[in-house]
Image (cartoon, helix red, strand yellow):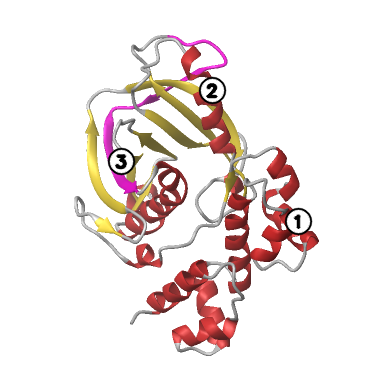
Amino acid sequence: MHAWEQIQKTVDYIEENLSEEIKIETLANLTGLSPFYFQRLFKRLVKKPVNKYVKLRRLARASEVLLDKNKRIVDIALDYGFSSHETFTRSFKDAYRITPAEFRSRPSRLTHVSKPDLFLDYTMIDEDVPLITDSMVLEMTRRKLDSPEAYVGLSTKIPISQMPAGETTGIDRAGQLWDSFHSCKGDIPYLLSDGIELGVSMMDEAIPDTFTYFVGGELMSNTCVSEPFVKWELAAGEYVVCCFEAENFTELSTNALGKAMNYLLETWLVKRGLTIQPFSVEKYYQTTSSEAYMEIWVIPVSIKDTMT
């Protein structure tokens, strides 16, 4: 059995027992390693120490329960392994920059540390061959766009440290921009109401460690738009496309999106000696069925080409 498979067993165990006491010795026994070597291997593969990972997963689960105002905050804290209301509040604020009480009174989109599928870090697939994990189906392919596509929507600047990818915590500013777009969508002229929606992440060269995020929908025609709306164009060209689907839209647009993005950028492209132009596109196809499906489009560049 591979090392990542042993650690995945402990990740699965943690997820199933977040409301129970979780001991390092128990997790180490699942892997057949000493507690010392287990913790070293866990941190290397999951990219976080065991205790910190457990706390962040508990906070993620607790944030869902906080929306139920019939449950006292202190009871939620105790249910998820926090010794007191004060300890829970301090940990929650450290992770999300707001207290549990503030979140309950004014619910906001949050970014969470997701349960990892380590399988994705060590599995390569050929193009047009589906990869099935325990949380989604993923496939890599190529698409040629013969003519540009025009979109209209909203944009904002976000620190890279707050990019939602399943590895950070905080307020989900990208998600908030989606909420703003959907709230004013009916007021945007020339917008195809049932067309493709997309989110675009673009590096901002003018402001270090910042990216511009655009969300919008298809334009009926290539026309001018007025503030506060902006137009963005997906250029004609050759793209690598990561297609994936999940059980529901919430899972698709949060955990699955982060895992698919990481697989595309950190595994699949890297092992093929490719990097990308400094933007990525998330395409959401609106459908009346129960399918939860989307695509990530990028323009690949050979690493050799970037060195010449």
Does residue 227 belong to the magenta stretch? yes
Q: CA distance from mark 3 to mark 2?
A: 23 Å
Q: Which residue is mark 2?
A: 183
Question: Looking at the image, is mark 3 or mark 2 earlier in the sequence?
Answer: 2
Whether residue 206 is situated above or below residue 47 in the rendered picture: above
Query: Which residue sits furthest front?
Result: 70
Residue 205 shows in the view? no
- Which residue is label 3 attached to? 291
Relative placement, left or right, of 89 versus 113 is right
Classified by dominant secondary structure, the portion drawn in magenta counts as strand
Secondary structure under tag 1 reads helix
Q: Where does residue 245 sit, x and y in percent of width and height?
A: 32, 47
**SS class, disc 2:** helix
Report the disc number at residue 89.
1
In the picture shown, does residue 113 fall above or below 149?
below
The quadrant the N terminus occupies is: bottom left
**Quick one: 84 or 220, which is closer to the camera?**
84
Give how far apart the Cα atoms at labels 2 and 1 are.
Answer: 31 Å
Question: Residue at the location (29% across, 53% down)?
Answer: 137
Crowding around mark 3 (Cα neighbors within 10 Å: few <14, some 14 to 19, many 20+) is some
